[in-house]
Image: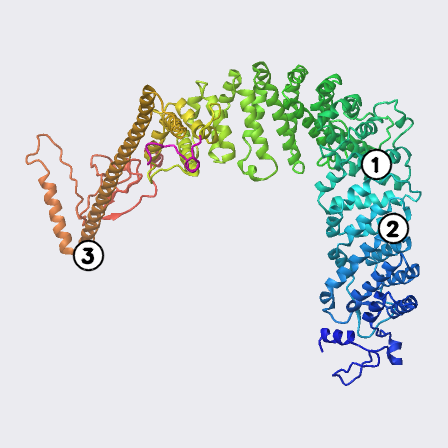
Amino acid sequence: MSTAETEAKVEAWEPGSRIRSSSPRQIPVIGVVTEEEEAQGVFKSMDLNRVIKLLEETDKDDLEDKQLISVKKVVQCYQNGLPLRDLARIFKILNLCAGKIKKQPHFLEPAFNILKLCSLPFLKKKVSDEITYAEDTANSIALLGDLMKMPSSELRIQICKCIINFYHAEPPKKHITGYQQASASYKIKMAEVGGLAKAMAQSLALLENELVEKLWVLKALQHLSTSEVNCALMVKAQAASGICAHLNDPDPSGQLLFRSSEILWNLLEKSSREEIIQQLSNLECLLALKEVFKNLFTRGFSHYNRQLRNDILVITTFIAQNPGAPMIECGFTGDLILFATFNEVKSQNPLVKGLKLSNCYEDFELKKLLFNIIVILCKDLSTIQLLIDGKVILALFTYVKKPEKHKIIEWSVAQYEELQLHAIATLSSVAPFLIEEYMLCQGNARILEFLEWCTNEDSFFSHGNSFHGTGGRGNKFAQMRYSLRLLRAMVYLENETVNKDLCERGTIQQLIGIFKNVTSKNNDKEEAILLEIQSDMLVILSGLCEHHIPRKEIFGTEGVDIILHVMKTDPKKLQSGLGYNVLLFSTLDSIWCCILGCYPSEDYFLEKEGIFLLLDLLALNQKKFCNLILGIMVEFCDNPKTAAHVNAWRGKKDQTAACLLIRLWRKEEKELGVKRDKHGRITDTKKPLLTSFQEEQKIVPLPANCPTIAVMDVAENIRAKIYAVLGKLDFENLPGLSAEDFVTLCIIHRYLDFKTGEIWNEIYEEIKLEKLRPVTTDQKSLESIITASENIGKMVASLQSEMIESQARQDMQNEQKVYTKIQATHKQRELANKSWENFLARTSNAKTLKKAKRLQEKAIESSRYSERPPNAIFHRTAIKGLNTTVPSGGVVTVESTPAQLVGGPLADTDIALKQLPIRGGALQRVKAVKTVDELKKNVPT
């Protein structure tokens, strides 16, 4: 039998009738329960629809008593839990009872008792009941929020208790056969679906003067706010502003402040932070926060009060990020600045008189939070005067000094170190807004002195526990890092007073010395920190030396050496992610700002092969560096000594600088989508430089002071810089170029002409769009310029075609030469094979050998003179009995030479060390040759 059919029969139940089941066992439905079932805790069935109908009746005299009795029976029936199938009707009974309370106070107790039942577990008979009755359950739970409007303190408190029990579910008192408890989170999910949190938040407005009830509601909201869904509902009900505005309401127990701050925390974490901040950014909320924080700061000494004070300050920090928050108007900003600086700068304000912070963890956290909120407050320019009056710069500078031995301080060593780093980091944000105060406090001198201490090798063990102390354990790297950040922030302002003061104090020489000291330390663990320190120093040096030749001269050769040292870094490290990329950018910026324009430094840079290093970096083909390197190359080429260095450079595979630049041009045009054919020739002679982006953009008339797309193109890619560099190297004498390079070089050579024509084309199109008609002279001039530009394009295209054809002919000739060489090689190989065959024939066939011998002798005889000259001595050149037909070599036996001097005809003499003599057709090596002296020794006396 389906659930719907069963419910229909139950609803249609009449006294004296029974529901028959198809099962063999008869289930009693009308309050008739067997003793065994009653012992097991089975529900006594009730007709809830009849109870509802009875409560809806109003025209009988004794009706109230009957109604109260029926509701009491309902309460008794469901003492062990509420079945999900009956939940909607039970809550309808609750709603009817609550509606009668105003006129019939006796219904308060039944309503209260039914609410108690809501704290019991929800029971399901089937697994699917949670889904089947989800809508009814959500609507029933939502009714709890509506009942908060009832003017009954008892009901309201019980409703809150009921909601709190959702999060602390208890098991049923008895196990009920056929039922099981719904999942632990089911009530919580249904409360989210029903929007209970919104109704509870709205009910706070009804309880402004009811402290006890308000505390219970806040406790319920505290539990509800642990869910993101509920937080979103509470935001819609403006819960944040409603709760915050009453933070300072009287409450002897202290629960109001604690629970309210907890709810605000949850709202900030689990809902839209921007919306919460916007709700809290009003005068009423800020005044309440101010008073609460002030009271906790001056009168709160317990651990709990200090934690609560810090929580309020964090919430205030979030609000301070909103520029529209009236922090100054309510006086909160002034109080926060006072609390942040009273420990370092003596104040006569009665608010902090006799007040002192301890070194407990909560006060330590408070100090850091106050530093943090100062950084946020200084972004509002209207706060500047308050920061000046509060002597914030002076207070922060009290931490920028080396630790003094034997001096008693209120913080531990680790705490003081962390506060010191936090103070310097705060100065980096605040000092740029307070330049006069910074200079009055001799900020530059203090920082440089502190940096000097950072480089000293004295004994100092830093703890490096905090965020700011990262990488600074056991060394002074963290202090150096944040000090340099402060200097970088001040130099970045380009304030001449600050920069001049730094230079007069020897900052350039000091930073160069520190840089050398840092680079000499090989610390792999802190490599990223050291790289950041080096980058910051180079940025500071660039800011000081830019546009000042005397300062560049101070930078000098020592500065050039540290730049060259960085440029020699292994290129593989650029992909390590440790910060080598940033360091290289800073180095290239230093070349631009500290070397260019100072001729002694430029010459020294060239002398130390700096241009070679720049070209090596350019050859890495990393797009992020190309633009900057080419800009430096353009400036360096103004030095007449640069061209020789550029032309002398050779890269991989003997690549020249000109070849590298031309290849970069081709790659850039490919990325820009410039139209070229497969040989790199111009395809559009009217617009030979047009990129795909320019082609997509339509020409729009612009004011005269606005650059057009064609003009912006010059700055947005590297083509103009490549043209400038090659132009200064002389287009006519560039070594190591291929035919393809020359084809591209034709376009580069005419880049300025093409760009000029492109801009005139834009002007012409704009005139058309604006429907203007130039005067005749201007019209002719404009047409002549455009035609001339197009003719240049045609001329270049023609020259490129000639080059390509010439190269094709040259390639054909080279190919023919190779073929000729191959043919000669093959012919020589054939002759060698034929000679070998003849040799084999002579050695394997006696007749052939004899025939060859006769031919050889005949050739020898024919080569001799027919008549012998008079008085000539005849030497035989042929060895008798030799059966070979190959030449016998350059060794001859001279009969006039005594045999004892040469050791015989087969001796290994100095004349024939490498070639053995021949005798009697056999080869023989003489093992030892006796000299004339040895012969004399062997002769007997």
From mark 1 to mark 2, how far is it between C-alphas? Answer: 21 Å
Label 3 CA crowd tier, 10 Å (few <14, some 14–19, many 20+):
few
Residue type highlighted by circle 1: Ala
Label 2 CA crowd tier, 10 Å (few <14, some 14–19, many 20+):
many
Task: Between label 3 and label 2, give the one nearer the viewer.
Answer: 2
| Residue 464 visible in the current orientation | no
Of the numbered discs 3 and 2, the one sitting upstream in the chain is 2
What numbered label is drawn on residue 288? Answer: 1
Residue 358 location, x and y as percent? 88, 33
Residue placed most toward the observer, 143 or 824: 143
Residue 770 location, x and y as percent? 41, 28
Q: Which residue position is annotated with label 2?
A: 216
Residue that appears at 33% across and 31% down: 686
What numbered label is drawn on residue 844? Answer: 3
* Region rendered in magenta: 683-700
Q: In this view, does 151 lie above or below 571?
A: below
Residue that appears at 77% across and 85% down: 24
Secondary structure under the numbered disc 1 in the rendered image: helix
From mark 3 to mark 1, how far is it between C-alphas? Answer: 124 Å
Of the numbered discs 3 and 1, the one sitting upstream in the chain is 1
Residue 807 is inside the magenta segment: no
